Amino acid sequence: MNKWDYRFLKIAKEVATWSKDPSTQVGAIAVSDKRIIATGYNGFPKGVVDDDDLLIDRQAKLKLMVHAEMNMIYNATQHGVSLKGATVYVHGLPACEDCFKGLIQIGVARVVMPDIEVHGKNWKAGCNFSKAQMKYVGIAVDEYNMFHDWQWNTNGQNKDTITEPYMADDHYNLRDKNHGSEVDERT
């Protein structure tokens, strides 16, 4: 990965913050020729109010939530933007066994997503299946550790560092088997 990849990952991370989901925030951007052509984050469909009662009702939220990758595709389609040949950057969770289908259908060339082994925990099998299917049809898939602090020296060389001590089990001890939703067992 190069400095442009890291720059776009930082933007995907920012897009993830637009999600109203109190437990899981995922962002996706599509890039072509170093230009952002579409964005998406996990959220309810247009017209469905981001009501706090729905956002904390786990079952209702899971039924309503549109994943970031699919929202990105829908937004591009609504504005007449083709994603054929684009690179998609995802922050928050790896592409799931539902979203990979949309990424294949729309014709993206590359997907850069969180590392399945580090960030996939309970849904590793589905994410690995999606990765295998994307690779099978010729989509390049790159994975990264979301907890790296990407820095570049004046010569353009990467000075990767981990920003804090990190144990995957510490981060995911409250997650369940569904696509990244957290369950706070302390309340």
Image (spheres, helix red, strand yellow):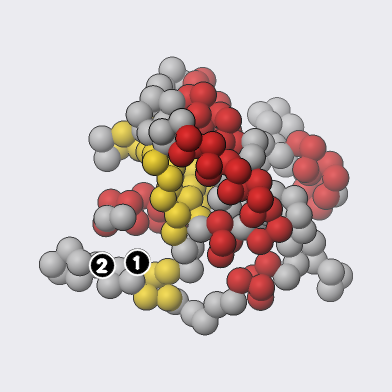
Q: Does residue 29 appear in the picture of this structure?
A: no
Q: Earlier in the sequence, mark 2 or mark 1?
A: 1
**Measured from the top left, where is residue 141 in percent x and y?**
43, 45
**Measured from the top left, where is residue 46 in percent x and y?**
66, 29
Mark 2, secondary structure of its residue: loop
Q: Is residue 166 above or below residue 122?
A: below
Residue found at the far front of this picture:
136
x 26%, y 67%: residue: 158
Q: Does residue 139 appear in the picture of this structure?
A: yes
For disc 1, the neighbor class at 10 Å (few under 14, some 14 to 19, many from 20) is: some
Q: Which residue is mark 1?
A: 150
Separation (CA) of disc 2 from disc 1: 7 Å
Quadrant (top left, top right, bottom left, bottom right) of the N terminus? bottom left
Instruction: Verify CB contact (< 8 Å) between mark 2 and mark 1.
Output: yes
x 66%, y 75%: residue: 170
For disc 2, the neighbor class at 10 Å (few under 14, some 14 to 19, many from 20) is: some
x 54%, y 36%: residue: 133
Q: Is residue 45 above or below residue 92?
A: above
**Which disc, if any, is residue 158?**
2
Q: Amino acid at mark 1?
A: Trp
x 64%, y 54%: residue: 124
Q: Nearer the viewer, residue 146 or 124?
A: 124
Quadrant (top left, top right, bottom left, bottom right) of the C terminus? bottom right
